[in-house]
Amino acid sequence: MIEVTRRDALVGAAAMLLVDQAVGAVPPNASLQGIAAQKGLRFGSAVAWSQLGVGGGSPAEPAYARLVEAQCGIIVPENEMKWQWLRPTPTTFAFDRCDAIVAWAARHGLAVRGHNLLWHQPKWLPGWLNDYDFGARPQAEAERLLTTHIRTVVNRYGTRIGSYDVVNEAVRPEDGVLYTTSLSRAIGGAEPALDLAFRTARESAPQAQLVYNDYMSWEPGNGAHRAGVLKLLEGFKRRGVPVDALGIQSHLITQGTGVGGHVLRLQGEWRHFLDAVVAMGYRLLVTELDTRDNNLPADITIRDRAVADYTRGYLDVTLSYREVRNVLAWGLCDRYSWIEGFEPRPDGARRRPTLYDSRFHAKPMREAVAAALAGASER
């Protein structure tokens, strides 16, 4: 059992008081999008698509649809635009689920982000592409496959999608080196492949925001990952590649109780990283926010409070950068979060990583996000 000591409580309270002093009251019953809009921000969430009754965080589920409509101003397909779902064969596309999400968003006045045009890791590419025979002219064939994919997707949605994660997770977290894929080997290297993806996206969608998206985080052990992302962004700038922004996934992992102390300890290196990114002229987006309740007791009251405070501390630091204009959660409800299947808690307690519980009731994390949005400076 993890004990919450009096010192932990005092350190946490002191740290949170520093940020609370600058925050006005959150309007009662205000939506998260409404709060965000007051500061020139947008709030949104990932959504899935499924048939009624199947679940999975889909607008086909009426209760979830109502929650997203009530709280969000922007959405992003959780999986439906990724190659594994969208590209079943070298010559075919399966747009039905992504089309349904974009159409639903249009009916409800929600903006849409695109995620993603290239997930640059072998395990997230379709099997046929990993084993593909690029023929006698491998570079030309790989370039044709990549550019055809990007142009087909981007041209299909036109101005209905205003921001794309063009490249997702190209940097190995353990050493900061770029992943190698079948496409990058055939094209002649990871950098030429990623550059081609962004240049093709810009040609096809000159109006869209083009984003490099990754999960480098502020928790300990992410230094090599952050350094690798900075090196990649520096290379984009040097080569004149049209990258507009860095997507910060923000899959947070709590470090235990005594949250205020953790926030104070982690924010220095995180600010150093963000300072370097914005100094290069990039915008920032929080693209996939959730908080894994690690190193915390099963007691829901303690666990929810620690998750909320940790999320609040992270957002207060990150939103202090005016370059951030969008905050998207990776799902709004514990019932549909990917975290439970990805990393169950060792004690068997159900994960609680999102803003609403499995019965769609707001949790302290929802209050924390609302307070962080309300406390952000105007953009």
Image (spheres, rainbow, N blue to C red):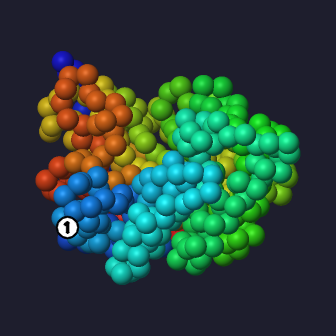
Q: In this view, does 289 lie to the left or right of 182?
A: left
Q: Nearer the viewer, residue 186 or 103?
A: 186
Answer above or below: position of 7 versus 161: above
Seen at 75% across and 70% down, the residue is 203
x, y percent for residue 348: 19, 26
Q: Is residue 324 left or right of residue 334?
A: right
Q: Can residue 38 be seen in this view?
A: no
Seen at 15% across and 37% down, the residue is 300
x, y percent for residue 279: 71, 53
Say few, some or many: other residues with alpha carbon within 10 Å of mark 1 (under 14 / 14 to 19 / 20 or more): few
- Seen as rendered, the residue at the extreme top is 1
x, y percent for residue 33: 36, 70
Image mark count: 1
The residue that label 1 is drawn on is 62
Q: Can residue 59 be seen in this view?
A: yes
Seen at 59% across and 65% down, the residue is 153
Q: Is residue 267 left or right of residue 49?
A: right
Q: Which amino acid does label 1 sit on?
A: Pro
Rendering quarter of residue 9 = top left
x, y percent for residue 63: 18, 64
Q: Which of 363 and 84 is in front in this view?
A: 84
Q: In this view, does 71 lie to the left or right of 193?
A: left
Q: Is mark 1 on a helix, strand or loop?
A: helix
Seen at 76% across and 43% down, the residue is 134
Answer above or below: position of 201 versus 146: below
> Which quarter of the figure is the N terminus placed in?
top left
